Amino acid sequence: MASLTERVNPRELLSRGGPLGGLIALCVVMTILSPYFLTFNNLFNVGTQIAVIAILAFGQTFVIVSGGIDLSVGSVLGLAGIVFGWATAVANLPLPVALLLGIGSAALAGLINGALITLGNLPPFIATLAMLSAARGLALVISGGVPLNPIPGAIRTLGSGDLFGFVPLPVILMIVMWALTVGILRSTYSGRCMYAIGGNEEASRLSGISVDRQKLLIYTLSGLFAGIAGILLSARLASAQPQSGFTFELDAIAAVVIGGASLSGGTGTASGTLIGALILGVLRNGLNLLNVSAFWQQVVIGVVIALAVMTDTLRRRRKG
Amino acid sequence: MSPLLEMRGITKRFPGVTALDRVDFELEGGEVHVLLGENGAGKSTLIKMLSGAYRPDEGEILLDGEPVRIASAADAQSLGISTIYQEFNLVPELTVAENIFLGRQPRRFGLVDRRNMRAEARELLERIRVLVEPDETVSSLGVAQRQMVEIAKALSVNARILIMDEPTASLSGEEVERLFEIVRGLKEQRVGIVFISHHLDEVTEIGDRVTVLRDGRFVDRVPATTDHAELVRMMVGRPIEDQYPRRRSESGEVLLEVKNLSREGVLEDVALSVRAGEVVGIAGIVGAGRTELARAIFGADPVDSGEVWMEGHKIERATPREAKRRGIGFITEDRQGQGIVPPLSVAENLGLASLEANTRVGLVDRRGQRRRAVEMIEDLAVRTPGPEQEIRYLSGGNQQKVVIGKWLLADSRVLIMDEPTRGVDVGAKVEIYELMNELTQSGAGILMISSDLPEVLGMADRVLVMGGGRIQGELAAGEATQEKVMALATRGTETAVG
């Protein structure tokens, strides 16, 4: 067990303080405006709704901390769901094999992203943009453009079941993935390398870090997380759909930057990302409760993204 | 009559540090006033108050006796204050004229009046007697010419006060002379000049008065003719007896051996060895291939042929990671770009090269890493508010100590130091030399590249002189003189590759 002083890192608190304050303020406002907002039922509802985006965003956090970007996660999520759906519904393979194939295909897509960036010397934006198109196309090819059914019952339970009768399983999975992300970023060799590479790639290389190998791993991790999110989404929809995860990459990136990470790399935390995802979720949920039209919701979310990052930048500049 | 510029009681605080503590400064028209102080003394912070980058927390700035408010670069410009920074602020793809008038191009009917702009640029360049065509793109110019363009740009706003932050850092001797001629011309035109430099010779040659800062405080204002030893004492706060305190140690067995290292157009058949306890200096002019050699030995750049041996083992796959594992450390010349990771803490920067060695089954021993970092901060007397401070806020000398400490924690037995004291002030320089003494006494070997000849002669036990990608000769510490080194260094220029 780490000592208290080590766990409460003031710098981490600082970079988390702003978004957390925003989330709390948002919740207070929603509680005042809607009596239904602050109920267990509704809060778990929010958790269930953001679970998929949060898991995608955790994977994205690795990439953004290391100074890159992964635009392909939404499509890779869709691909993982379809490969999984094909394996169970069409090929009738056993569930563990189907899971392995689904998540494995996503990890492979991430590995290919990493290879394009390191061996192919492509900028991350371009490499993952290519994968965004290719993975979506593959999902359509494999599925023939139609949803694949049925999804095995065990997996459907993951989408709609509860623990102790009231904590939704998607929320449990999200918390497990959050803990995993915290552990990776804080305590693993690769996690520490992500911050170093994002902060100064050349200095990292000249300190004896195999930057290329680490990048392969980072993008593979991002793909892997997208794969897990893909299985979860199929479970929630009880069906594998080729269009699943369309434009989810944008929500994932938004969650990471609202959470205080910088797109220039070197900063960002798992908890910040979780808060970013919660802000997006609470906002959507609250606007729904208030009967704001879906069209206006998009406008509001756009404004919130801009405001969140702007205040965060200002706050940091004042501290610097 | 009130002076052209007066700064009174300027105070500026940053989180954890008071960068400036009630500092006074004044400048007359037609004067070159030198700001002297170690890195971190507050020189840059002070001039940033004049350029509008920072606002003072306390104190006032007066121009011709009138209080002024400088809240932005535009304010500074309209008050006639221009700054030439250490890093160039030119856009390489644009022409000289476009750079000079960037953002303020003369306009006619809303379009840029190119003819007018060229003519005005030509006039400015002639005024400071610089032979550069306004239509040349900046990327085609050398460093010295770019410096001159910066000056022309600074003057184009009718500057009454010109701030020059280490303008000679990247210039050769001849170019420095040209720059000084320009400065003298500006003095005649009653421009007031704030001049920052680490070279005391330049202070005497070009300066009128000197203001010395130390640890953010005003120390004294003295004439530029003041004795150098006295200036150093004021800067450092104590007298420095020996500028190069090399203590030679017994040299032991060969640690690093380089055989026939070649890379087409860069290195030609380079062989050298470094023994335990030795400081081997590499001298040579810019472009001689010294940095390229260092990078090749460390595996940072590929080579066509040749071998690197460390402690009797041949390094098979030349990568920085392999070199590190064998016990080689590399302190690069570009500290900002290749040495430190700016957003990370001092502790994390210290742990960077030893991260892998302190990882078990993928998990980093974070507590151990932190403890070792804290010890190293004490051992090297790194001046930082704490191990968690972001390294970017440290002074150059302290950053350099962290970079060296990083390799000590990685258990390096041979350190390749490329310009180890560049941008480091007098006091920290001596500390780094003392550190080199301790290292060699404990059996490490050092390969030191430096453009500072007195440093090479003062610290190295053997001097290898490079020219044109080859080693032109070797001089023992006793026989090496500036003349002999320069004679060898220029011998290679006829056969130079680049």
Image (tube, helix red, strand yellow):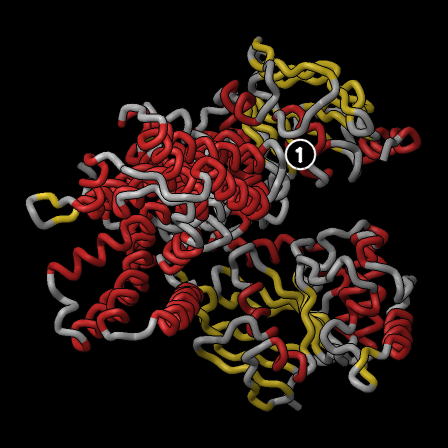
Number of numbered tags placed on the structure image: 1
Residue at the farthest top position: B312
Residue A4 in view? no
| Position of residue A113 measured from the top left corner of the image (x, y, whole percent) | 52, 37
Q: Nearer the viewer, residue B248 or A40?
A: A40
Residue found at x 78% / y 34%: B284
Residue found at x 51% / y 60%: B214
Tag 1: Cα neighbours inside 10 Å, few (<14), some, or many (≥20)? some
For mark 1, name the chain.
Answer: B
Q: Nearer the viewer, residue B20 or B268?
A: B268
Q: Tell me if A302 is positioned left or right of A205 in this view.
A: left
Q: Is residue B328 above or below residue A285?
A: above
Q: Is residue A242 above or below residue B210?
A: above
Q: Mark 1 highlights which residue? A: B458
Q: Tell me if B118 is positioned left or right of B335 in this view.
A: right
Residue found at x 87% / y 33%: B490
| Position of residue A106 measured from the top left corner of the image (x, y, whole percent) | 42, 35
| Position of residue B466 measured from the top left corner of the image (x, y, whole percent) | 78, 28
Residue A219 in view? yes
